[in-house]
Amino acid sequence: MKITLFSDIHAKILLPFKLVDLYQKETGNTIDFILQCGRPLINYTTF
């Protein structure tokens, strides 16, 4: 199983998916799981 980890993506939610798609097309390798972690899009402390 191949896993990718992206962190601190600064609200660019689709960027990891696009990068994985590009990687898969260029190498022929497949990624089974994408894990994104970092800050939420909304600052919950302001509510």
Image (cartoon, helix red, strand yellow):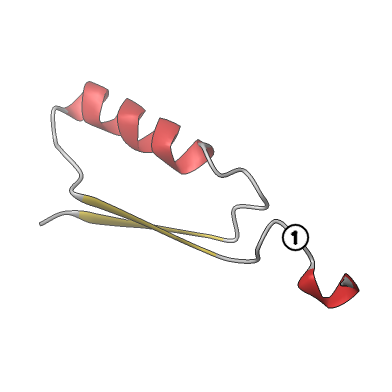
- Please provide percent x and percent y for residue 12: 61, 43
Q: Circle 1 sits on which residue?
A: 42
| Residue 5 figure quarter | bottom left
Residue shown at 25% from the left, 23% from the top: 26
Determine the residue located farthest toward the right in the rendered image.
Answer: 46
Q: Callout 1: helix, strand or loop?
A: loop
Q: Quadrant of the C terminus?
A: bottom right
Return the x and y of residue 45 as percentages of the image width and height: 83, 77
Residue occupying image coordinates x 34% and y 26%: 22
Q: Is residue 39 left or right of residue 35?
A: right
Q: Residue at 41% across / 37% down in the picture?
A: 17
Give the class, few, some or many, for how many residues have Cα within 10 Å of label 1's Cα (few <14, many ≥20).
Answer: few
Front residue (pair 33, 4): 33
> Can you tell which quarter of the image residue 41 is in?
bottom right
The type of residue carrying mark 1 is Ile
Residue 40 placement, left or right of 23: right
Is residue 34 found left or right of 32 in the rendered image?
Answer: right
Above or below for 45 versus 36: below
